[in-house]
Amino acid sequence: MLMLEKRSNPSRGWTYASPIVAVILTMILGGIVFAILGKPPLETIRTIFFDPLFSEFAWFYRPQLLIKGAPLVLIAIGLSFGFRAGVWNIGAEGQYIMGALGAAAVGLAFYPTDSWIVFPLMIIAGTLSGILWAMIPAVLRVKFKTNEILVSLMLVYVAERFAASMALGAMRNPDGMGFPGSRNLSQYPSAANLEIFAGSGMHWGVVAAFIAVIFAYVTLSRHILGFQVRLAGQSPRAAAFAGVNPARLILICLGISGGLAGMAGMFEVAGPLGQVNVGFNVGYGFTAIIVAFLGRLHPVGILLAGGLMALTYIGGEIAQSNLGLPSAAIQLLQGMLLFILLMVDVLANYRIRFAAGEK
Amino acid sequence: MKRRNLLASGVAAAALATMGLPALAQNKTKVGFVYVGPVGDGGWTYEHDQARQAVEAEFGDAVETVFVESVPEGPDAERVMTQMALDGADLIFTTSFGYMDPTINVAAKFPDVKFEHATGYKQADNVSVYSARFYEGRAVQGYIAGSMTKSNIIGYIGSFPIPEVIRGINAAYIQAKKVNPDVEFKIVWAYTWFDPAKEAEAATVLIEQGADVILQHTDSTAPQAAAQAAGNVITFGQASDMAEFAPMPRVSSIIDNWAPYYIARTKAVMDGTWTSTSTWDGIGAGMVGIGEISDAVPAEVKAGAEAMRDAIAAGEMHPFTGPLNKQDGSAWLADGETADDGTLAGLNFYVEGIVGDIPQ
């Protein structure tokens, strides 16, 4: 019989090494899967993990990494606060949608006014919308002890329906020939979240993601809030003795994650995506959960993990087009990454013992 | 270091935007396909992929086709198209309405690459649009449905309330009403093109409300399976034949047949005769196929449906022929008048007799 025995002294090095080991193991196992699918394993792995960075057309893919990675990092940074404190916001996707809708509402209301104020107002509206949507599970948890995992997740579906109704109704483009979808905000200069340098991929959302990383790093390591967040997660009893107000912490954690998810939605709807449409959300809020854990809930780790996830998306598309790899194989690879990371973590913290069948 | 890379790539992109991509020396014509669903969806994307394979079969070694499936509509689609163009594609088919703006954006950066966008309305010098008159097939379905229903309740699973789907509902209703004045349509909006779970749920709800015919504008076979489980409910294959459910519940189908168009357009690129066009073909041109009408349909209904199919194909019958009123009772088409393509393309109202509102 297999038994897991907690290591008395898990090595500190493993905390940093396990994501790297997990990535390498994923490459090896992924290669085996690709070989079974009849694709050349080495070439496929190279296409997914290296071509976006070093191939002939890397000048196109590198900026795309920023575009794809920025919302993931922005949302994951927000989630990491809650996850550290034991507040489980699974509904970042919904907060992302509401942020995009709030920002689009402001942008469309001003259309076609030409003013510098529109863009900042949209950022504020997007962030506030995300915070408000996250306050629903937060307040319900604080007041009625509801489970924020369920409430935040269910609210994703409410937000999706709301987005569909907006795309078909209030926000529908009057010049859109009767098709659903709003005006394209990226074609409205005052609202557009364009690249700061053409072709660099560096739009304001990317800047915000980098600022969020720094902000989170400083807060978690230097600020009293960071201390409280870490303490609440590690030892709720100790946190209570240290005077941490759990209700306040829940509100703050959900507020931060909702706000950043909303902001990510704003930058997306004003820039790369451009418009509100039915089903415009593509799962950034859910993928960000993987990014947060892959990055060890550490700001710098999240930055790297966001880049890695973006890499597998972009490389995965190249592999589909060039090698005929099915898209499900890419999703499999991304799932394997988290699964293997968790496995490596278990092995780092526990020792496997083969025990005789004791009763 | 990072900054320098970014600037360098910015310069490269600017160069690309102004000069276009230098034509790569190659002898094969490369054709790319961007799909919104998985190739195994059994419906919309499946048929586009069948047509891709037909292009390969037709030209053999002279062409190379590539595809990327399940591409979300938005920045991801734009990236996939750009990547195909960079990798030397000569012709790219973007097979979903939501790819419209991405197609136009990418086409502007690659003036030498030809683009074909399905079901949209924005054209450019190197962007053609194409779609099929699925409503012609819907008319035939409506005729069979109206003739065969016993409960006089026909269930309709809509995907999104867009003109294409609304055209289909109207076309089916007009013919159903003609053969059966007591017929009633119950419409459920699934807000998806492909989601077996939601589609099965919608079909079940409609059957519980008494529908014994289910029409679907969604692409999975889940409604067929739900109808089969319920018994005595008939369905129609959507996008592809769905023949595995024949002869019951599937009594006929609308088949999207993109192969002739894709072959012709690929040929045009090879010959250098490609120009930007707007194509809207129906049964006559073979873009819309009516799947075999099964023996579950009474012989005289089958004969009538086939006669209607042939009349539409020959141009002798138009599914939208007056007298027709709008839902609110106001006049739309006078006796003998047919709807023009412009109105049909943006159709956003029900005809008289359909109950319910188009979701806003």
Image (tube, coloured by chain):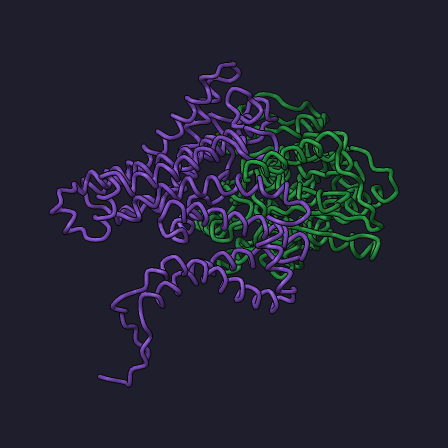
- Residue B135 visible in this rendered orientation of the protein: yes
Q: Position of residue A52 (x, y in %)?
A: 60, 48
Residue A97, visible in the rendered structure: no
- Residue nearer the viewer, B130 or A122: A122
Q: Image point 64% across, 41% down: which residue?
A: A59
Chain B hue? Answer: green
Please state the horizontal and vertical placement of residue A26, each as a whole percent of the image.
Answer: 50, 62
In percent of width and height, residue B273 lies at: 87, 38
Residue occupying the point 64% across, 39% down:
B175
Q: Residue at x 68, y 39 (%)?
A: B118
Q: In screen coordinates, is B307 left or right of B80? A: right
Q: Position of residue A279 (x, y in %)?
A: 50, 39
| Above-or-below relation of A51 to B355 | below
Observer-nearest residue: B23 or B203?
A: B23
Q: Does residue B43 appear to the left or right of A151 in the view shown?
A: right
Image hue for chain A: purple
- Locate the N terminus of chain B by quadrant: top right
In this view, the residue in front, A354 or B323, is A354
In which quadrant of the rendered view does residue B349 lie? top right
